[in-house]
Image: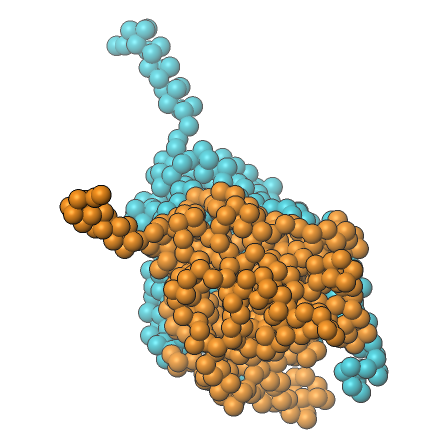
Chain colours: A orange, B cyan
C-alpha cells in the first residue's frame, strides 16, 4: 500500500503530466492556393491591404519559385507546358510527373503512385486533408487516391460518364465490381486519413443500384461523418472524421456588387469600322461584398483550426490545406471571388504559423499548383496618349479598391465560358524551419521530397 | 644613392605590386530585365533549356519578390497599379515612388530626385550604365538624369514634341536656354558617369540650330565617344567613354522564322454565327532564328565585360546593366525577340557572377522593372474535351521548342498595336553577398537602400 504522501505525489505527477503540453514531432502543413500565381497575390494584396500593404504570406522568411512539369499522356517524354490541378497535385503528393487529369497515377501506364499520406500513415503519423472544394476534387484526391481521371469522383461517374461534349470518361477498370479500388469518394472513404474536411456530400451519397454509398463505406471504415458546421469543434478526441459542408464545392466568401464579374468593353459603332475610330465604354467600377450564399459555411481557417487540434500529437502529422476557389473563380472571371479566397488562405496560414510557433518541428509550406488567367492591367492604357480607343479583346473588371483607386483585372486567355490556366512558374513560401533547405528554384515534384525528408519517413 | 641590391629589391617590389590583382571594394552590379516577369522567365527557360532546364538566374541563392509602386501625377497619394519603365527605374535609382513617365523627378512637384549614380560618384566610386536600348531610354536615363518626361530624349524633343496623337510633351522648363539642364542626352553628356554603352547615337547627334549637340557636350566633358563595336575592347585605360552602337535601340538577337510574331486565330464563318459552332484555325507553329539585322551589334555580355574591365578599381563601383527589349518585343507580340533578350541578360549575369567570384564584395542583383503581357497558355485548351472552337481573343504564337513540343504564348491585354504592361509583383535575385539581407517581399524603391547600404555611401 502507498503512503498518503506517495499517493499525493503520484497524483500531483499525474496531474502535471496531463496538463503539460505535448509538442508535436516533425509535422508538415502544406497550404495550396489553387491557381494562386504572382498575379493573384498582387491583386489580392492591392485590394485587401493597399499597394503598400502586406499579405500574411509576405512575412514568411523563405521564398522560392516552382517550375511546374507536365507530360503528354500518349508520349510521357514530351513536355506539356500548362498543368491542371490533377497532375500538379500528383507531383506534390507523390514526387512524380504525370499528365493532365490524372490522380496519383502514371502517364501512359496508369500505375498507382504512392502518396505522402500513405507513406506518413505507414510511418505512424496522422494525416488530414482540408479544402474549400469538394473533397473529391483533383487537389485533395491526388493526396490519397489513385485513378486515371479526376472526373471519376463517385460511383455514378465511373463508366461512360459524359464530362463534356463528346468527351466521355471511362474509369471502369477501377470499378469495385471489376476488382478495382472504386471512385475517388469510395477510395477516400476507405483511406487511412484521420480527417477530411470540405465539400462534396453529394459525391458521398451517390451510389449505383443497391451498392454501398461512399458514406456507408466511410462509416464502416471507422469515420464519423458529419455535415453541420456546429460539429466542427475542437478537442473532439481522436475519432477519425469526415466533415462535408456542401453538396459540391463550398460557396466562396466574396462576390462582386450585384454578382458582377469581368465584362466586355463596349466599343462604339464607329470603332467596328476601324479600330482607331470611335470610342469605347469600359465597364463601370465595382466593389467586392459578402456573398449572400455563403451562409454558415465554415471558413478555411475554422476547418484548419479544427484539423490542427485533431491531428496534434507527439508523433507529428501531415496536413494539406487548400483554398480551391481562387482557381475556380478566376476561371469564371470573378476577381472578388478570387480575392476573398486568397484572404481565406492567408487566415488559414496564420493558424498554421501560430501552431508552428508552439511546435517548432512544424514545416509550413505555401504554394500554388499552377498559374491562372487573371492579369492586373492598367486602368488607363499606358498608350492612352494616342487618343484612340484601347481596350481588352477579352473581359475586364474594374475594381474600386478600399484605398481609393481603380484596379483593372483582365481575363483574355480564350473566348470560351471559362478561362485557361497558365504555365507560369509559381511561388513557394516556407517558415524558418526550411531556411537554407529550399533552393531558389525547384521543380514541383521536388516538394514531395522536401516534405518526406522533413517528416523523416 | 641606392645600392644595387636595394635597387633590385625595389624593382622586384614594384613589379609585384603592379601584377598583383586589385580587389574591388564594395561594388553593386544591378541587372534589369525590362518587363522580365515570372511568365517571361518560364517561357525563356522552356525554350532555351527545356522545361526541366535552368536559367543562369535560377542558380542565384537569394530569391525575393518586388511590389512595384506607382502614384498618380495629379494626386500622388493615389495608387496606380501598373508602372512604366520610367517610374519603376526611378524607384530603384532614387528610392522614391513617382508617376508614370517621370525620370528621377517627383510626381506633381517635378523636384529632382538624387540618383544612386550621383551619390556613388560623390563618394568617389566609378559608375556605369549599359543597355540594349538607346542610352536615353527611360531605364538608363532614370539612373543619371532628371526630367519631367521620358520622351524628352534630345534637344529636338524638348518643346511641343508630339509623342502620339494629340499628346504633346513639353519639357521646355528644362531647356538649357531657360537655364535648365537640357534633354536626357545633354544631361548624360554632362554626367559624371565613367561609362555609357548602348544605342541612341541619333539622340546624341541631334541639335537645334547652331547649338551644341550632346555629342559635342560629351567630348567637351571628357568623354571618348565611339560607335564601332571594334572599339569595345577591354583595358582601354581609365578614359571616360560613351559607346553608341545604333541610331536608336540595338537590334535584338532573335526573331521568329520569316519574322513571325503572334497572330490571330482564324475562326470559320460558322463560328462567327455562334461561338460553339464551326472551327478555328490556329496559327502554324514556328521556331526562333537569328535576326538577320543583328549584324555586328555587340552583345549585352560583351558590353558588360567591357564595363567590368573599365570600372574595376580598388574603391568599388556601381554598374547598371539592362536587357531592354524583353519588354519592347513583348509589346510587339514577338516571343522569339523576347526570349533572345532574356538569354542576353543571362549571359551578362554570368559575367557579373564571374566578376563577383573574384571580387567578393560585389553584390549582384537581378530584377525586372514591371510585368509584361505575354502569358504561357495551353496549346490545347484545358477544355478541349468540349469539342467546340476555343481560342484567344487576342494574338497567339505557337513556338516549336527545341525539346520537341509546342509552347503557346498569348498576348491579349488590348486590341491596340502594342500590348500593355501588367502590375504583377516581379522577381528579385541576388548572389550570396545578400544572403540574409533581403526580405522575401520588398517594395521596389527599397532596392535603392539595399544598394546604397552595400556601397556604404
* Quadrant housing residue A53: bottom left
Position of B160 with respect to A209 (left or right) is: left
Q: Is residue A99 above or below residue B13?
A: below
Residue A216 showing in the rendered view? yes
Q: Residue visible at 50% across and 62% down?
A: A240
Give how far across and how far down residue B258 sits, in percent.
78, 59
Closer to the camera in the image, A96 or A409: A96
Closer to the camera in the image, A295 or B98: A295
Q: Is residue B368 above or below residue B365?
A: below
Name the quadrant of the N terminus of chain B: top left
Give how far across and how far down residue A433 sits, in percent.
40, 48
Closer to the camera in the image, B242 or A12: A12
Q: Residue visible at 64% across and 92% down?
A: A268
Residue B363 showing in the rendered view? no
Q: Residue visible at 37% across and 14% down?
A: B12
* Quadrant housing residue A81: bottom right
Give how far across and how far down residue A19 sits, in percent.
27, 55
Farthest left residue?
A: A5
Position of A34 with respect to B446 (left or right) is: right
Amino acid at each position: 500500500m502507498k503512503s498518503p504522501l506517495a499517493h499525493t505525489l503520484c497524483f500531483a505527477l499525474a496531474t502535471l503530466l496531463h496538463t503539460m503540453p505535448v509538442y508535436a514531432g516533425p509535422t508538415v502543413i502544406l497550404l495550396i492556393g489553387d491557381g494562386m500565381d504572382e498575379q493573384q497575390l498582387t491583386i489580392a494584396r492591392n485590394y485587401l491591404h493597399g499597394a503598400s500593404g502586406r499579405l500574411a504570406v509576405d512575412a514568411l522568411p523563405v521564398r522560392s519559385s516552382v517550375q511546374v512539369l507536365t507530360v503528354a499522356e500518349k508520349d510521357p517524354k514530351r513536355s506539356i507546358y500548362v498543368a491542371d490541378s490533377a497532375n500538379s497535385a500528383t507531383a506534390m503528393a507523390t514526387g512524380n510527373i504525370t499528365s493532365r487529369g490524372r490522380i496519383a497515377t502514371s502517364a501512359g501506364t496508369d500505375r498507382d503512385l504512392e502518396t505522402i499520406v500513405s507513406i506518413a500513415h505507414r510511418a505512424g503519423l496522422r494525416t488530414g486533408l482540408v479544402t474549400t472544394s469538394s473533397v473529391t476534387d483533383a487537389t485533395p484526391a491526388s493526396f490519397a487516391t489513385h485513378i486515371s481521371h479526376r472526373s471519376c469522383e463517385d460511383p455514378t461517374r465511373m463508366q461512360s460518364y459524359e464530362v463534356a461534349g463528346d468527351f466521355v470518361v471511362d474509369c471502369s477498370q477501377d470499378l469495385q465490381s471489376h476488382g478495382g479500388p472504386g471512385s475517388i469518394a469510395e477510395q477516400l472513404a476507405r483511406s487511412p486519413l484521420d480527417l477530411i474536411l470540405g465539400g462534396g456530400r453529394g459525391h458521398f451519397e451517390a451510389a449505383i443500384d443497391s451498392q454501398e454509398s461512399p458514406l456507408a463505406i466511410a462509416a464502416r471504415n471507422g469515420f464519423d461523418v458529419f455535415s453541420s458546421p456546429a460539429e466542427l469543434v475542437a478537442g473532439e478526441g481522436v475519432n477519425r472524421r469526415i466533415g462535408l459542408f456542401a453538396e459540391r464545392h463550398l460557396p466562396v466568401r466574396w462576390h462582386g456588387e450585384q454578382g458582377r464579374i469581368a465584362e466586355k468593353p463596349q466599343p462604339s459603332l464607329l470603332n467596328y469600322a476601324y479600330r482607331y475610330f470611335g470610342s469605347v465604354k469600359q465597364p463601370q467600377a465595382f466593389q467586392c461584398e459578402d456573398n449572400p450564399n455563403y451562409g454558415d459555411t465554415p471558413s478555411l481557417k475554422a476547418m484548419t483550426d479544427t484539423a490542427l487540434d485533431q491531428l496534434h500529437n507527439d508523433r507529428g502529422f501531415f496536413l494539406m490545406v487548400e483554398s480551391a476557389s481562387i482557381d475556380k473563380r478566376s476561371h469564371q472571371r470573378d476577381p472578388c471571388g478570387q480575392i476573398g479566397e486568397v484572404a481565406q488562405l492567408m487566415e488559414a496560414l496564420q493558424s498554421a504559423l501560430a501552431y508552428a510557433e508552439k511546435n517548432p518541428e512544424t514545416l509550413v509550406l505555401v504554394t500554388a499548383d499552377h498559374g491562372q488567367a487573371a492579369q492586373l492591367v492598367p486602368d488607363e492604357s499606358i498608350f492612352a496618349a494616342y487618343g484612340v480607343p484601347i481596350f481588352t479583346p477579352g473581359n475586364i473588371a474594374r475594381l474600386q479598391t478600399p484605398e481609393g483607386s481603380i484596379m483593372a483585372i483582365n481575363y483574355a486567355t480564350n473566348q470560351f465560358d471559362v478561362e485557361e490556366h497558365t504555365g507560369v512558374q509559381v511561388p513557394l513560401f516556407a517558415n524558418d524551419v526550411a531556411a537554407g533547405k529550399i533552393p531558389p528554384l525547384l521543380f514541383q515534384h521536388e516538394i514531395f521530397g522536401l516534405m518526406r525528408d522533413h517528416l523523416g519517413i
